[in-house]
């Protein structure tokens, strides 16, 4: 009963918020509704018993990624509404409607493959984060490490791309002098 | 009773919303938001499958999707900033430099 | 003994590869010397093998490696040394060695000296593969190798200009080479069919397996295989109607002619019939065998008649080869396979000698070939005169030279088999043979010195060349005495059936021999009477219909040109202009145009706008979703 209430409440809210996200003209509204939707998705995760995933969703998505967007926003002019030639509405209606229709048709069909075997069933007597940890650090250890390296690479890439004059060395003396020269020229 | 199919339909609808955003918007930042929506739709499907089939693999995939999303945002936003500095706009119609 | 088999087989191959290394460099005498030495090695190995087979009576069968293995088909690279192949090997390598040494002298001034030796040795190697193989596939490889090498060698002077057929019937070396190759291809197709028929019905290509299975095959299969294989033999051995290439092949350097005629090419057809003697001896294919004998007899007469009037030194010898091949086929067709093989060997010796002598004359006469422009050469070319005289005596069948014994045996066979018509024709042909060979000898070496008015100063060939020719001369003289021993040797194994004259024939042998001899001597004397004292041209005779008919080779080449080459060219042009240009080309061009225009149209999709690309992508997504939905409903 509670599960049903939670599901329908979260579903309606998420759909509404995400519609706002993709349709609004104001970047700030869009971002805020996205963050709110993320929080509600974390709620869905909790109802599904994926506690740890829900927490990660809150921390990473709502915490880190939205903060990143918020910082990035400072580079852009967000006070004005976004002006753009949106794509032809009928085309969007056709493609989006068709996709939605197909998804609903496919997803509402009874799942036929009853013989799916659970590879890693949760162990009895452990909480979800414990079970996740056990699977993550045994079977998924290598992907986990690779993901870590990927995040590191992405971090460096973000710094290089967004940082100022990161293509110049800050350590060798000549470059420092050159840089100072440039700075002085900028000031003039 | 809520079935797996309900979650999957929700996931499909959210994915479609994201797709509509991707198709409709021309602002790159909005495209990014729409992409996040699509990624989250996929996450819901994974978590639901994981729950109903009693298998943790689904959650594992959701974790990795989150990691990918984080990386994507880090690199993507860096690129957006560079683009904005160079062109002063994030509108796709003004960025069509690869016309065939 | 196995290693001798490999030495005999691969020495010519090594020689060819070695000479090919210097193919593009200027003349190096040592290339010819080493090639000759390797050929001599091959001959020695063959001779040792022959001794071995003679003494032990056994055969050597080696399998070098598996060659083709697909499903039930298994063809090993196997070689067999038995009485038949060892005879061929010895003859081939002996003649080839002499020809190699001869070529060092003959090709002295040719800029492609090294290339020539490469081809020559490859030619010998192909022939060795052909005669030594223990299966039809290996035989076919050698068969084709011989064809390719003959093409290379006949067209050796490919840079010569084309001339009109009136001036030179064989137009140019490259034309002659192509003719030889194409005619042989036509025959090879039939031979391939024969091989397929045998494989299809016996499941193997090995000689022993195929021949062991012959009694279980029905008549149609046997007849088809026999006919098809014989057509292949006809092409290689230049039997009517595929004979035109042989005389045109005279465009090649003279040592090549010697090799083609005596050792490595035309004998292959006879060899095939001899090798396949279990097939041709089957009572079911008696008619085919009789046809072979009849065709052989016809060709013997047909070619000899053309040789009577020809003025070209080499062509006369070529016609005589054709004629002697006819004799061989007559013997083989009548079942006297060992006699055919004996004539093949004896003929190889004196025919090689004749050609090499003709080469000496050409060398002396600045490549002049018209015997009407020669005469009286005996003063300056005494040794060549002796050699060619001996070879011609052997060819004419004058005892006690080789040709008498072998040819007489064939004519006796014809009598013994009761085919009196064939016998009569062969006897008459023997007389004609004697006449034309001595007409040639007398016109070249005796009488008035007609060459003087052309300002030619003949000179004798190099000493070492003359010495190298001596083994052939010796063999041309004495080979006949080994007839009895050869018969015992060749029929001692189980690869060659014996053939003996009946009692009746045996009683008449002296009378028969005398008749043949009378014709032969008559031919020689007639030639001496008419030509020994010099050339007296009788225009009345030369303008007669028969003379012109013979001179124009019965108009067969003209017939081919008119009724085969020209219609074929016409059809080809039609096909080119209609089928090729209007159907095939347009189809292909249409496909290309369609792809080009579709690319041109879809180019508009490449707007460079990411949003458009995303739209297209979502079209794809929708399409995939629909496909997934439909396939899940169906499946």
Image (spheres, coloured by chain):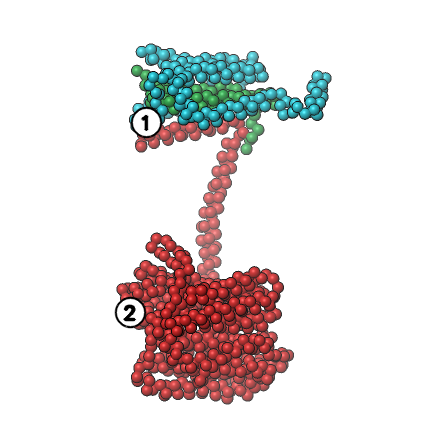
Q: Please report the residue visible at 45 percent of the width from the left and 72 percent of the height from the top.
A: C47
Q: Position of residue A21 (x, y in %)?
A: 47, 16
Q: Nearer the viewer, mark 1 or mark 2?
A: 1
In this rendering, would B37 be left or right of C74?
right
Q: Quadrant of residue C455?
A: bottom right
Residue marked by disc 2:
C284
The foreground one among B73 and C485 is C485
Q: Position of residue C628 (x, y in %)?
A: 36, 30
Where is the C terminus of chain C found, in terms of image quarters?
A: top left
Could you tell me if the residues under marks 1 and 2 are in contact, i.e. CB atoms within 8 Å?
no
Colour in which the image shows chain C: red
Q: Please report the residue visible at 42 percent of the width from the left and 82 percent of the height from the top.
A: C481
**SS category of the residue bearing label 1:** loop
Q: Is residue A147 above or below residue C193?
A: above
Colour in which the image shows chain B: green
In this rendering, would A6 be left or right of B92?
left
> Of the numbered discs in the image, which one, if any, rests on residue A117?
1
Judge the density around disc 2: few (<14), some (14-19), many (≥20) Cα neighbours within 10 Å: some
The foreground one among B35 and C199 is C199
Q: Chain of mark 1?
A: A
In this rendering, would C494 be left or right of C434?
left
**Labels 1, 2: one chain:** no
Q: Position of residue C111 (x, y in %)?
A: 61, 66
Q: Please report the residue visible at 33 percent of the width from the left and 68 percent of the height from the top.
A: C279
Q: Please report the residue visible at 33 percent of the width from the left and 81 percent of the height from the top.
A: C501
Colour in which the image shows chain A: cyan
């Amino acid at each position: 009963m509670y599960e049903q209430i939670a599901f329908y409440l979260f579903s309606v809210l998420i759909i509404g918020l995400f519609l706002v996200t993709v349709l609004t003209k104001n970047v700030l509204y869009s971002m805020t509704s996205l963050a709110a939707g993320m929080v509600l998705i974390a709620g869905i995760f909790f109802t599904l018993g994926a506690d740890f995933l829900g927490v990660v969703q809150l921390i990473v998505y709502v915490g880190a990624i939205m903060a990143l967007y918020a910082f990035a926003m400072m580079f852009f002019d967000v006070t004005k509404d976004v002006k753009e030639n949106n794509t032809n509405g009928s085309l969007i209606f056709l493609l989006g409607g068709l996709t939605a229709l197909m998804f609903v048709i496919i997803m509402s069909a009874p799942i036929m493959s009853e013989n799916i075997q659970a590879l890693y069933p949760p162990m009895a007597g452990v909480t979800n984060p414990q079970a996740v940890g056990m699977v993550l650090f045994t079977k998924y250890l290598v992907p986990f490490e690779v993901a870590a390296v990927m995040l590191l690479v992405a971090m460096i890439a973000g710094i290089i791309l967004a940082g100022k004059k990161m293509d110049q060395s800050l350590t060798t003396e000549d470059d420092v002098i050159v840089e100072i020269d440039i700075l002085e020229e900028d000031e003039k | 009773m809520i079935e797996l199919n309900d979650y999957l339909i929700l996931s499909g609808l959210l994915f479609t919303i994201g797709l509509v955003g991707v198709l409709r918007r021309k602002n790159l930042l909005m495209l990014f938001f729409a992409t996040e929506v699509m990624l989250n739709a996929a996450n819901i499907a994974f978590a639901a499958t994981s729950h109903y089939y009693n298998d943790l693999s689904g959650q594992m995939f959701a974790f990795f999707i989150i990691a990918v999303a984080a990386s994507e945002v880090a690199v993507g936003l860096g690129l957006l900033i560079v683009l904005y500095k160079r062109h002063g706009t994030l509108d796709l119609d003004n960025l069509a430099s690869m016309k065939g | 003994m196995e290693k001798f088999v490999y030495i005999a087989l691969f020495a010519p191959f090594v020689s060819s590869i070695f000479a090919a290394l210097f193919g593009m460099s200027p003349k190096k005498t040592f290339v010819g010397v080493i090639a000759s030495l390797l050929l001599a090695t091959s001959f020695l190995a063959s001779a040792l093998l022959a001794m071995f087979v003679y003494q032990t009576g056994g055969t050597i069968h080696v399998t070098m490696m598996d060659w083709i293995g697909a499903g039930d088909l298994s063809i090993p690279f196997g070689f067999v040394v038995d009485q038949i192949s060892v005879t061929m090997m010895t003859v081939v390598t002996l003649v080839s060695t002499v020809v190699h040494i001869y070529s060092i002298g003959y090709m002295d001034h040719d800029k492609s000296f090294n290339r020539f030796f490469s081809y020559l040795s490859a030619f010998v190697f192909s022939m060795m593969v052909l005669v030594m193989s223990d299966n039809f596939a290996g035989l076919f490889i050698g068969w084709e190798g011989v064809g390719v090498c003959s093409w290379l060698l006949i067209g050796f002077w490919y840079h010569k200009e084309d001339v009109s057929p009136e001036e030179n019937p064989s137009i140019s070396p490259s034309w002659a080479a192509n003719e030889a190759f194409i005619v042989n291809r036509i025959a090879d197709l039939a031979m391939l069919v024969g091989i397929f028929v045998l494989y299809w019905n016996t499941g193997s290509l090995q000689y022993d397996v195929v021949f062991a299975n012959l009694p279980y095959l029905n008549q149609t299969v046997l007849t088809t295989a026999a006919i098809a294989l014989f057509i292949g033999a006809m092409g290689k051995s230049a039997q009517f109607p595929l004979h035109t290439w042989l005389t045109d092949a005279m465009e090649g350097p003279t040592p090549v002619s010697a090799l083609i005629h005596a050792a490595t090419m035309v004998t292959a057809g006879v060899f095939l019939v001899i090798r396949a003697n279990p097939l041709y001896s089957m009572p079911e294919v008696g008619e085919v065998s009789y046809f072979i004998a009849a065709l052989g007899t016809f060709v013997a007469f047909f070619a000899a008649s053309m040789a009577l009037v020809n003025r070209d030194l080499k062509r006369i010898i070529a016609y005589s080869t054709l004629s002697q091949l006819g004799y061989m086929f007559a013997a083989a067709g009548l079942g006297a396979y060992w006699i055919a093989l004996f004539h093949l060997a004896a003929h190889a010796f004196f025919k090689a000698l004749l050609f090499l002598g003709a080469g000496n004359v050409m060398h002396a006469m600045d490549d002049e070939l018209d015997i009407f422009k020669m005469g009286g050469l005996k003063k300056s070319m005494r040794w060549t005169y002796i050699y060619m005289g001996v070879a011609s005596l052997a060819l004419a069948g004058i005892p006690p030279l080789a040709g008498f014994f072998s040819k007489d045996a064939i004519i006796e066979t014809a009598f013994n088999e009761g085919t009196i018509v064939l016998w009569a024709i062969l006897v008459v042909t023997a007389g004609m043979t004697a006449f034309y060979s001595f007409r040639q000898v007398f016109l070249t070496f005796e009488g008035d010195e007609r060459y003087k008015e052309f300002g030619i100063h003949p000179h004798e060939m190099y000493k070492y060349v003359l010495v190298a020719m001596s083994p052939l001369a010796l063999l041309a003289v004495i080979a006949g005495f080994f007839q009895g021993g050869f018969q015992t040797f060749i029929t001692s194994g189980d690869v060659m059936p014996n053939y003996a004259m009946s009692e009746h024939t045996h009683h008449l042998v002296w009378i028969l021999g005398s008749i043949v001899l009378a014709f032969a001597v008559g031919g020689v004397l007639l030639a001496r009477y008419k030509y020994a004292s010099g050339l007296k041209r009788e225009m009345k005779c030369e303008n007669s219909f028969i003379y012109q008919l013979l001179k124009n080779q019965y108009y067969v080449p003209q017939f081919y040109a008119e009724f085969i080459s020209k219609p074929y060219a016409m059809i080809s042009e039609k096909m080119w202009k209609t089928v090729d240009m209007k159907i095939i080309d347009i189809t292909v061009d249409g496909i290309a145009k369609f792809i080009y225009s579709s690319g041109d149209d879809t180019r508009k999709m490449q707007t460079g706008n990411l949003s458009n690309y995303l739209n297209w992508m979502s079209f794809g997504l929708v399409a995939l979703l629909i496909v997934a939905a439909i396939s899940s409903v169906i499946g």
